[in-house]
Image (cartoon, helix red, strand yellow):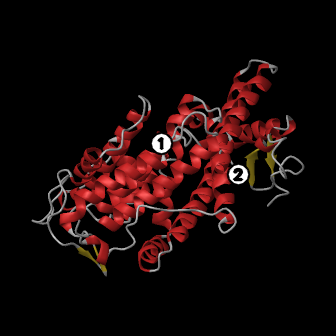
Amino acid sequence: MDERDYVAGHPWLTFAYRIEFDANAQLWARLGEAFSKCQHLTGAPLTPAVAQELGAVYLAKGALATTAIEGNTLSEEEVGKIISGGLVLPPSQRYLQQEVENVVAALRAIDVDSRHGGTVITVDWIKQQNRHVLAELDTDEHVAPGEFTTANLVVGNYRGAPPQDVPYLMDRLVAWIAELTDGTDSHPASVRFFGAFLAATLSHLYLAWIHPFGDGNGRTARLLECAILTNSGLVPWLSANLLSDHYNRTRSEYYRRLANASSHGDVTGFICYAAQGFVDLLREQIELVQRQQLRVSWVNFVHQRFQTLPNTEATARQRTLLLSLPDGPTPLGTVRRLTPELAEQYAGRSDKTVTRDVNRLQSLGLVVLDRHTIEPAIMQMAAFIPGRASSSPRDRR
């Protein structure tokens, strides 16, 4: 049988990867930490409202990241408003909004599938993702959304695989993904996680190398990566988009690692880079979740504490003031206007009333005061967080 055309020009498309423990101990350590942190997040109790809020935040981050890598200039705030339906851009910028909406729709579909048995990764499914990301966008004449390219593609200094070999290569990629993720329930969860992470990052790398579509290859590759992580059942949906966020934050390094993987055969370097970024952002995510959990515990504590106090108008106002305080110091001169509810309760009252309320909260040990600021004594809830319980918020600054 004649050798296929891609072999000479793309010898790195081997569909084989072997990782040795001794030579790659650092990578295994990173993957072990990533697995542990995913387990931590999966078991983290959150109220439905907080879970929904965090889900919206990370959906916006993921959609922003994967489109920003390709040149989308919208901010995270703008993306959040687009997702919530609170922003429609003018016609000249409408394509930026469309790019984000396309990715959001694809991500939501992956999430829905994960709740109903997961996504079956097929060539047609990958084509569908490309069709999603390019929907209603103007494209070059040679681009057919959701269809393999028939043109020889060159992106920067990189030439995609020969178009005549693309269907064959994509069939091999899908078969390889199935092989890498074929972890039965008899395998430890950690082993299945390692297989899923390798499948996700390698499929991202290979799809970028093959470059099967006329446009949208990067976004399609990152959707594929997200779907594989989600399908594993070991990466919470909240975390499935973190790799895209990592690539966007470190964009120049992302491109360098992609290039080195093909030109120098440094596939392990790309996987290590992805694993380190994943771990770093999982740490950030856990800290955020802990803060949210701390806040929920604080609110419950405040309500319990005030149940022991006389049920008066002043007590109700003081509770509203306390629960309106954000984390960290707040200028004393602004507290009466922190929320519309608080402003209404202080309407027609003098600053002396505010001072009495603040002093009352201090006497109850519920706030920390200095001459010009006030902050909730929320850290008294952090008895089991290392390095926090032994000092006041003021001492740690």
**SS for callout 1:** helix
Residue in the picture at 47% in, 64% down: 247
In the image, which disc is placed on residue 230?
1
Q: Nearer the viewer, residue 314 or 386?
A: 386
Classify mark 1: residues with Cα within 10 Å, few (<14), some (14-19) or many (20+).
Answer: many
Residue closest to the far front: 1
Q: Nearer the viewer, mark 1 or mark 2?
A: 1
Q: Nearer the viewer, residue 137 or 78?
A: 137
Residue assigned mark 2: 328
Q: Nearer the viewer, residue 369 or 82?
A: 82
Residue 176 located left or right of residue 164 = right
Residue 69 located left or right of residue 216 = right
Three-letter amino acid code of the residue under disc 2: Gly
**SS for callout 2:** loop
Q: Nearer the viewer, residue 390 or 374?
A: 390
Residue 253, position as x, y percentages in the image: 49, 74
Residue in the picture at 63% in, 52% down: 34
